[in-house]
Image: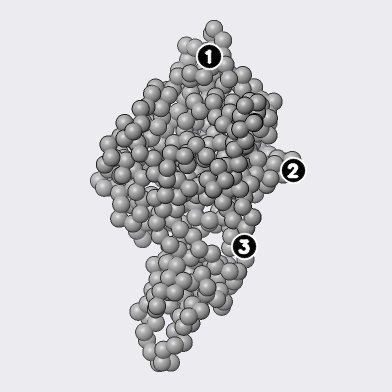
Amino acid sequence: MLSQEQNEKLVRTGPGTPMGQLFRRYWIPALLAEEIPEPDCPPVRTKLLGEQLIAFRDTDGRIGLLDEFCAHRTASLFFGRNEECGLRCSYHGWKYDVEGNCVDMPSEPEDSRFKDKIKLRSYPCVERAGVIWAYLGPEGTQPPLPELEWATLDADQRFVSKRWQESNYLQAMEGGIDSSHVSFAHRYNIDTDPMHAGTPGLEYLKADTRPKFEVAESDGGLVIGARRVADDENYYWRITQWIMPWYTIIPPFGTHNPLGAHAWVPIDDENCWAWSINYHPTRPLTEPELESMRAGEGIHVKYVPGTYRPLANRDNDYLIDRQAQRERRSFSGVEGISAQDFSLQESMGTIADRTKERLGTSDAAIILARRRLLAAVEDLEEGNPLPGTEPVHQQVRSASLVLPNSVPFHEGASSALVARPGQEFVSI
């Protein structure tokens, strides 16, 4: 159980907060490239770590991520004109380049040098894997660019989506490292889910609802082993990678299915972006797989049209179907693996009160992840290297496999937990 002070330290990510300072030292998945698809397209609002920002792609294709509000009279640049390598405020015409420099001030005298003194806060961005990544930390302290396996593959080998989750990032992320809930929340759906159906291992999840957890620190975060009984001589292991500060890789179900991954990025303290990724390291995704993903199946969702908000949301009780619940077509009555997760996570409130928790043995990974985050804050304050920032920290995989009872999972699965280009992943 956390103290209120510890909980506050973990969940607050705005400017000047300890966790906010830490998260600003990582490259952040800020928005999908499809949101600013071409030069001089309309700018879009985005919010990260409590900062209201505007993103745009200029005439030369460069990406700008600026303070949303004009330095003149604080009108929103969302209403600005994206033209001639800059974003021009529609109120008085002040214009900014991708670095936040004011390059034109038509409302001032022609010989005025006033514009040279004006600069909006701006952040460097890179485009990789269909994602715009931003660095919000101090100048000159950027880590290497993201090397998560899905971010290094060809476009036809991955599918990336995001959705708005109406809760703090931490309770969402903790759901991603909680392997025991699969035996309950998804119990009646994993057989028919397109990314799970027909795969070995499902019988172990249903038969053994009391997994034993073994958790070890890695250079990048945690390696989380969930052990279930396979038979008298073997254990079925589902091994999850948690990579600082907010990434998880889902243990696979069969090598014929794509891998799955997530990231939970704070919008502010009461909302986050939940990123969902399917990818295969050795082949392109098939058209049926892509059709399923585009339709919002598996770890993806159907949207309220024109938004990234799930169609099933708190305003409509997540379209809960009590008849389906009674008939055991759904454990909670909510349709879809993703919605089953976020409906329960959002039900905790926008910020969960962890002083009321009573954690058990199945929560070992959650306990250690919190400790790892708090320790990383201390690392930052002391000037130590941060976990999860180096490429080798990110070049990992999750795995699911059967091992003899006598073999420790971190030994028996060691080679399976490394991402090697072009090499198949390990799953029964």
> Residues at badges 2 and 3 in contact (C-beta under 8 Å)?
no
What residue does disc 2 label?
Answer: 287
Q: Position of residue 194 (x, y in %)?
A: 68, 34
Dot 3 surroundings within 10 Å: few (below 14), some, or many (20 or more)?
A: few
Instruction: Say what secondary structure mark 3 lies in.
Output: loop
Instruction: Say what secondary structure mark 1 lies in.
Output: strand
Is 291 on the left or on the right of 414, as rendered? right
Dot 1 surroundings within 10 Å: few (below 14), some, or many (20 or more)?
A: many
Quarter of the view holding residue 200 = top right
Q: Quadrant of the N terminus?
A: top left
- Vertical order, 178 against 42 (above or below): above
- Residue found at the far right of this picture: 287
Residue 37 is tagged as 3
What residue does disc 1 label?
Answer: 229
**Whether residue 298 is visible:** yes
Q: Which residue lies at the image location 62% right of the left edge and 66% below the top edge?
A: 38
Instruction: Say what secondary structure mark 2 lies in.
Output: helix
Count the labels in the image. Answer: 3
Q: Amino acid at mark 1?
A: Val
Pointer 1 or 2: first along the chain: 1
What distance separates the C-alpha of mark 3 from that of mark 1? 49 Å
Q: Which residue lies at the image location 56% right of the left edge and 51% below the top edge?
A: 309
- Vertical order, 253 against 204 (above or below): below
Q: Position of residue 359 (x, y in %)?
A: 37, 27
Q: Position of residue 236 (x, y in %)?
A: 54, 18
Is 394 on the left or on the right of 1, as rendered? right
Q: Position of residue 270 (x, y in %)?
A: 42, 49
Q: Amino acid at mark 3?
A: Pro
> Residues at badges 1 and 2 in contact (C-beta under 8 Å)?
no
**Whether residue 391 is visible:** no
Residue 402 is tagged as none
Pointer 3 or 1: first along the chain: 3
